[in-house]
Amino acid sequence: MDWDEFSDWGARVSQWAAAYHRTLRDRPVRAQTAPGEIAAQLPAAPPEGAEAMEAIMADFERVVMPGITHWQHPRFFAYFPANAAPPSMLAEMLVSTIAAQCMLWQTSPAATEMETVMLDWLRQAIGLPVGFAGVIQDSASSATLAAVLTMRERALNWQGNARGLSGQGRLRIYCSAEVHTSVDRAIWIAGIGQDNLVRIPVTGPLRGMDPGALQAAITDDIAAGHLPAGVVACTGGTGTGACDDLSAVIAVAKDHGLYTHVDAAWAGAAMICPEFRTLWAGVEGADSVVFNPHKWLGAQFDCSAHFLRDPADLVRTLAIQPEYLKTHGHDGLINYSEWSVPLGRRFRALKLWFLIRAYGLDGLRERLRNHVAWSRALCADLGRDPRFEIVTAPVLSLFTFRLRDGDDAAQIDLVNRINDDGRIYLTQTRVDGRMAIRFQVGQFDATRADVEMARRVIVELSGG
Ligand SMILES: *Cc1c(COP(=O)(O)O)cnc(C)c1O
């Protein structure tokens, strides 16, 4: 393909993109294909000869699009949102055009310096105090892995990377049962082992870990000769939006010199609205905090904001400088690849710059506030209907409910009926061992009418 052809196809693809978004409401939200249906339409072997772009694009429509679940659909109420706001998409097009590897300052100074400033914009936007430094990770899972590795190295007096874990005491990490599975995987990958991830029971309507039980668990572990290393707290857990009491949890952790990492992957975006910050009161005491602008804030995946009170601990854990990665002649530069597990990194800060400028913080706040208000209104409506029971009250824009007269199978059956219908999409979770249906609003193009349609679909398919 030459650049003239590229230019024509680029224009066609962006026209396609705009048309796609304009007509999204007409498509079923969740892909309606059966397993294997898409693979069966793909040739088993690669072509030997070149094919025309016209044919490739036609096959994209015919083969691929039916197998897409539309995350940008305004009636996507499943999981958590993954917004790709239009200004962010445009920035990503520019970034994929430039295709720079931004691992070191000198491999694109603009990317590094933009990242430093954008993370400071975000720090201010979510109300973290001066002093927290930020880095963009590819995902919250990577940020949490980096945090767990830092906990490990601190607790082993910086000897883990050098000597490995054999012959060391048992490292112990604490969290509630409400944290995301990325914590489990970080523990596996760090070599700490699932048995050393200590689950602290939760209490209260926000399902936060019991600080007294945390204190007792740490004390018991010390008595047993183990090595407590850190606490992973959550603000807005994935199942029901559980929030730990950060002030209390961090106070216990600090008592024992433990590192605290806060996973606010979804809920952190809401902290651009000061009225929601009570959910993470005390966060300023954490050692690190992660939130995903690629979920609710509108920055296209991938963009995970990882804030550190003192990046030195993380850099000490992850930095490695062979001669070929050294930058001579400049002192004190940030090389962000020393702050993350992968070496290579995309220019991810540009989409934040485009996004925040194009909407302003006020424009972003307005969207999030609407989502929260519409979700609360729907929860109140369902709560008044005797067929439903609210299982967990809204945390921001997420609540869970179930059919009052129905076992677990009946809840799953309803979820399947709703998703097969296609007008809306939602998913399930378990709360205290029983199945519940999750509902969250967070898609940027969602309107009050879309949430109203969700109410009608839920009621109708529940036999109303
Ligand atoms: C989505 C989510 C994650 C995982 O985020 P990735 O960026 O996909 O790794 C972790 N924790 C919470 C609370 C989440 O909501």
Image: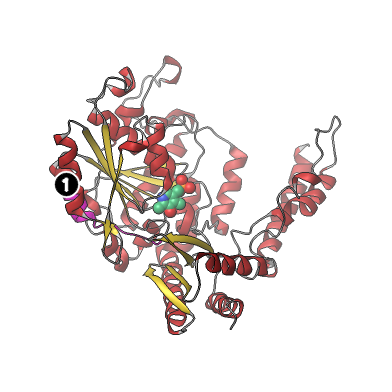
Percent of width and height locating residue 262: 31, 49
SS label for mark 1: helix
Percent of width and height locating residue 207: 30, 61
Percent of width and height locating residue 140: 42, 45
Q: Is residue 399 shown left or right of residue 40?
A: left
> Which residue has dot 1 on it?
216
- Quarter of the image where the C terminus is located: bottom right
- Quarter of the image where the N terminus is located: top right
Q: Is residue 164 shown left or right of residue 298?
A: left
Residue at figure coordinates x 29%, y 62% from the top left: 279
Q: Which residues are magenta?
A: 240-252
- For this rendering, which residue is in front, 231 or 168? 168
Q: Residue 274's quadrant in the figure?
A: bottom left
Q: Residue 196's quadrant in the figure?
A: top left
Residue at figure coordinates x 30%, y 33% from the top left: 150
Q: Is residue 275 above or below residue 288?
A: below
Is residue 114 visible to the viewer in this orientation of the structure? Answer: no
Percent of width and height locating residue 318: 36, 28
Q: Which kind of residue does numbered mark 1 sit on?
A: Ala
Q: How many marks?
A: 1
Is residue 186 visible to the viewer in this orientation of the structure? Answer: yes
Tell me, yes or no, whether the highlighted magenta stretch contains residue 249: yes
Q: Is residue 140 above or below residue 70?
A: above
Q: Is residue 270 shown left or right of residue 225?
A: right
Graded by Cα atoms within 10 Å as few (under 14), some (14 to 19) or many (20 or more), the crowding at tag 1 reads few
- For this rendering, which residue is in front, 176 or 17? 176
Q: Looking at this rendering, what residue extends furthest in the top direction?
A: 323
